[in-house]
Amino acid sequence: MDNIIKADNISFYYSDIQDEDKPAENKIQIFDGLSLEIAKGSFTVILGHNGCGKSTLAKHMNAILLPCGGKMYAAGIDTADEERIFEIREHIGMVFQNPDNQIVASVVEEDAAFALENMGVPPEEMRQRVDDALKAVGMYEYREHSPSQLSGGQKQRVAIAGIIAMQPDCIVLDEPTAMLDPVGRREVMKTVKRLNREKGVTIVLITHYMDEAAQAERVVVMDGGRIILDDTPCEVFSHVDRLREVGLDVPQSTQLMYIMKQNGYKSADTHIINEEECADLLYDILTKGEQK
Amino acid sequence: MLKDITIGQYFPGNSLLHTMDARFKIIVTAIFIVMIFAADSFSALLPPLIFFILAFALSGLPVKLIARSMKPIIPVLVFTSVLNVFFVDGKALVSIFGINITDEGLIISGMMVLRLIALICGSSLLTYTTSPIILTDAIEKMLKPLSKIGFPAHELAMMMTIALRFIPTLIEETDKIMSAQKARGAELDSGTLVQRAKALVPILIPLFVSSFRRAEELALAMECRCYHGGEGRTKLREPVSGGKDYAALGVTLLFLCAVLLINMGKVVI
């Protein structure tokens, strides 16, 4: 399968001195020699606690930041190619944490149209794409509302509509649910999953909610600027000790299995990440009367 | 409490005035203002008055709105009329404490009050029937020719759009910060004027800090959506002008002619 995003041995650091001739002082190394490939049409979650470099990595994906060393390719284009920077951003959309700070216009549909206006799309085509984008996130009925009248989850969906109107191949979401209530979180996750499933949009979701990570096809765990685990959610969450070490939790079902296993239940399986499987297994254990 | 403030009061509707091209509405309003200041007698003020009544009837807005838009300018009205009554020279009608009230003064202050009322009502009719975003678009479109000589038309319109977008957000934020400061014992509504002004500092500073943060994030989000200035930009809603817009402009010009003719004494009412 083709890769939509490819990080080839990239490094990045922040430094005090902006002058390129002098060696950088007070370097804060975010990551060094990081490589990652993301397949077209996949649903990848990047996990990691604060300051592990996951947001910085996300900003490399659509050329907001450029790597200090190594090469970053987005949609097959080298992100260091300044001439094609807008092309990259049309292919790789980005959604941020705070919905309030990414909505530009005071009418929902005007905001969804913002990217298209920038791209110089003709008005008739724009109308169609805006309507489609708003329908795809289920906000079409609210198209003439002001964003200030909407709930957090609805605002975030409007922000997503503003991105999908560009018809990108990939959407990078940087903790899109962190500021939302549980209802808003569910709305956003449902929208994101549907986009992935029905429209084949590649999703890169950065989060620290384990239940969201459990819904992905692939989970990448970062710590201190390195990728420490990269596998299916099942496999990743079975490394309970390793995740605990880097300050991450596991889904509640996995946690329960882990505790049971420690207490000697042989059939307990830490590959279980959702409630139904967990309940089935508990039922089996209880009916068959397995002892330690 | 801050949530009650409405800015750029717009009353949605489908009347002729609502559906008119905003650019024409701005031009018509400007001509209307010229009309009321060109008129130099009560009879010359009659055409603009009729024009306003006509326009208001077409807008389908409730009459009480006129009263509402008048409220804030009552002190200004009283002040200007009193000044004019006392300080304009002419034939004295009554003399109080050596200050004369003259016939000229009465006429001039009467005209002034009428002009101000017409001015406020006329221009509020524009904002009542045009949504701020459409108004901004219209201003951008009208100023566009000036961008050739370096006037930042698009930037100005973008700033207005963002300001309009963030007013409710910042009001909400101010409310939150005020509650937070009150919870820590800040007294915001009592004390002398100086004390109250000082109490505003712990509200304004967090507000500024968070506004800058918001601005930075917004700039980032705009960049992610390919924003690169006004060049090669298209619009979701292009303002379109039709026959009714030109007709409205024609009628307005006729009224202006009427005013000028009355001024010159060619027409006597």
Image (cartoon, coloured by chain):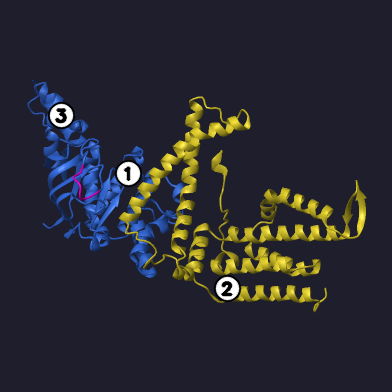
Question: Which colour denotes chain B?
Answer: yellow
Residue B182 pos. (x, y %): 51, 28
Give the class, few, some or many, for how many residues have Cα within 10 Å of label 1's Cα (few <14, many ≥20).
some
Question: Gap in Å between the C-alphas at discs 2 and 3?
Answer: 70 Å
- Residue range corresponding to the magenta coloring: A19-24
Residue that numbered label 1 is attached to: A97
Type of the residue with mark 2 = Asp
The disc placed on residue A245 is: 3
The residue under the point 14% across, 31% down is A240
SS under mark 2: helix
Type of the residue with mark 1 = Gln
Q: In front here: A35 or A131?
A: A35
The disc placed on residue B245 is: 2
Same chain for the residues at labels 2 and 3, yes or no? no
Say whether residue A94 is left or right of residue A107: left
Locate the N terminus of chain A and report the quarter of the image it occupies.
Answer: bottom left
**What subunit carries mark 1?**
A
Type of the residue with mark 3 = Glu
> Residue B197 appears in which quarter of the rendering?
top right
> Residue B111 appears in which quarter of the rendering?
bottom right
Q: Is residue B76 visible?
A: yes
Residue A13 vertical placement versus A251 (above, below): below
